[in-house]
Image (tube, rainbow, N blue to C red):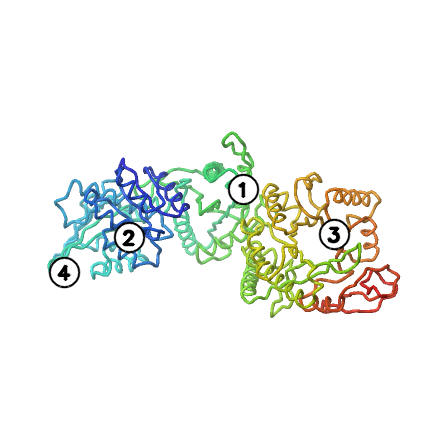
Amino acid sequence: MAEAPLLIVDDDANNRDLLSRRLVRRGYAVHAVASGPEALAYLAAHPVALLLLDVQMPDMSGLDVLRQVRARPASPRLPILIVTAKDQSEDVVAALELGADDYLTKPIDFPVAFARIRTQLLRRQAEDRLRESEERYALVALGANDGLWDWTLSSGDVFFSERWKATIGHRADEVGTRLEEWLDRVHPEDVPRVRRDLDGHLDGVTPHFENEHRIRHRIGTYRWVLARGIAVRNEAGVVTRMAGSLSDITDDKVIDALTGLPNRTLLIERMSRELEHCVVYPDAQFAVLFLDLDGFKVVNDSLGHQAGDELLQCVSRRLEASLRTTDIVARGTEGTRDVRRLAEHTLARVGGDEFIVLLHHIQNVLDATRVAERVHQALAVPFPMAGREIFTTCSIGIALSATGYQSPDEVLRDADTAMYRAKSQGKGRTEVFDVAMREHVVQRLQLDTAVRRGLERHEFEPFFQPIVDLRGGGLVGFEALIRWRAPDRGIVSPGEFLPLIQENGLAGPVGRQLVRDVCARLREWKHTYAWSDALWANVNFSSRELMDRGLVARLLACLDEHGLAPRHLVVEITESTVIDDFTRMAGLVRQLQEAGIRVVMDDFGTGYSSLACLHELPISGLKLDPTFAGGSLRRQEIFRAVVMLARSLGLTITAEGIETSEQLDRVRALGCDFAQGYLFARPLDAAAASRCLAEHQPPLLLTSANTPSRRMVADATGGLACTRAGTTGQVWADASQ
């Protein structure tokens, strides 16, 4: 390891941090800067072992930095790796022509990146000792994993170093001197790629040869290797020799660096063997347990990623220990390298907080559920970390080989499906896959596709439910509610698509479209009915949307685009959202109120908030369910007390869900300011809401229940019909009547 640091140059802070942390974890000293001028200044004052240089940077590109570095006589041999987008081959060509030694493409494949960095550092060491040898490619590997090869094309002979032979478990006298000694050991699936890359370099298509592939070990297993080389050409441009190295990258390919467990690659290999075994022995069975930690994101968000990594390491050790209850967990060898193996189980980490247990030999489903129960018990004990105790559970999905799978991906798919069923059923539990789950997933996938297409085709639209002034009578606003008008299904229930929108990350786009449509409709009404300028629209936002730091600015921009004032929009937040992150919500509410956009709390009284929070939350009003005011006198007194508290704080009270005249009389008597509900109208599409405004222009007053008048009633299509009412419930009426 070089004492001088690796210098990372990237204007993206996230990229710098991620690559720095990964390299430091590998034992490298690292220094990172954000621009080309900073890099040049650092190089002028400090020794550097290797330069990782991003191409696309403002002010001074990576190519400009590369040009200046190579022009400096003091650092002609500094290894330089450029980092570019996968589709920017012209940048790679330009950088290589300017003297770059190698390149990485985004997103970075870290095992490949580590191998390339290590190779360049070793090459620099080799050049310092072997300057006279310019014909041989300077990919000299002195570590335990690197071997050399030298191919003379005229004779066809290949020199394989002893280290090369040891990489695949052979002694010096067990490998011949023909190229077939290498190619015949390559995994059949990888042979076409190896030949393609080799021929591409020999034909001059690529500047050097590089290929990752599997090669058969002496004991019959396969090792992952990185082969690199460069051709030597004579004056006529004909290749005469080709030399390079072979690096064992098995650990990087099949072992999870954080936990030391097998990763997805090794898991898939072992699952493939199990499937082949089941073909030969039909009575044999195996099972896959898909584990996902519950609430892991909370640990990362609250305590930081370092704490999250520590928890994953602790969980992996706890899981290994739980599997040792009846089965041996040992460090064995595959080839010449140590990897973790389970005698009867394979425990793997496949990404994030997801773990897989492969039960190699089981009798029935009870064997799998017993293992799952041991896992639950193991995780039930809190994890001591940084002076505190961390509690976590996991959701487990089980898939059995008896289902008749053809590939590992099919098994993992169904185990994953069962795991999500466990999460949806309350977390911290186990579910065994059945065919009905798959059908449900297919239906959800179809619905997800339809939702995404619906968003593209503008099938989501606002419906408007009138808000009534209980003090003076009349229409004062609407609550805008999202509806999906699917071409093949008509109006789809919000309960069917809203949870899916939240899960698949579409809440933001759908919410932005809703706000635009609502503002457009308010503008239309404002221009059509001058009196409607006093109307406002309440809009609900999901918790994910409320976490968007640009929400306030976006709302103001939309209002301004449509010629509306902030008073025309009211933001509704739920009590549960406030409780989940009170500090953040309080800040957001202050921003909205300062911008002139009112905020009301919906569903107040149905959650767990304290009345005291109303003193700290600068909202404009509350929305209450009428059931809160019904029933016993005690409940009515509680409702009255809430109204009085709201009055003392200067808050308005809106009673929602009004369906009967009795409910209306009660909430009006208790002092509510506004009301909405089916008694007045169901949510209306834009056309029906426009007819409502046209037919019920001011002055409009809310009369007593026994006064003949006109009222709004919802017809079968969800629109409005104006009818004469006699002794029916509360009504919309002309003041002249």
Q: Is residue 271 left or right of residue 228?
A: right
| Amino acid identity at mark 1 | Val
Q: Which residue is mark 1?
A: 298
Please identify the quadrant where the N terminus is shown: top left
Crowd around label 4: few <14 · some 14–19 · many ≥20 (10 Å): few
Q: Nearer the viewer, residue 550 or 426?
A: 550
Write down the residue under mark 2.
63
Q: Is residue 514 above or below residue 10?
A: below
Q: Nearer the viewer, residue 615 or 341?
A: 615
Specify the farthest residue to the left: 235
Tell us which disc is closer to us: 2 or 1: 2
Q: Is residue 584 visible?
A: yes
Q: Earlier in the sequence, mark 4 or mark 3?
A: 4
Residue 240 position within the rendered picture, expressed as x and y whole percent measured from the top left:
13, 57
Would you call the spot at circle 1 few (<14 residues within 10 Å), some (14-19), or many (20 or more)?
Answer: few
Q: Residues within 10 Å of mark 2 (few under 14, many from 20)?
A: many
Q: Residue 99: horizontal and vertical position, in percent?
A: 23, 51
Count of marks, rendered view: 4
Which amino acid does the dot numbered 3 rest on?
Thr
Cα distance, mark 2 to mark 1? 41 Å
Q: Which residue is denoted by mark 4 in the rendering?
A: 237
- Residue to which mark 3 is pinned: 654
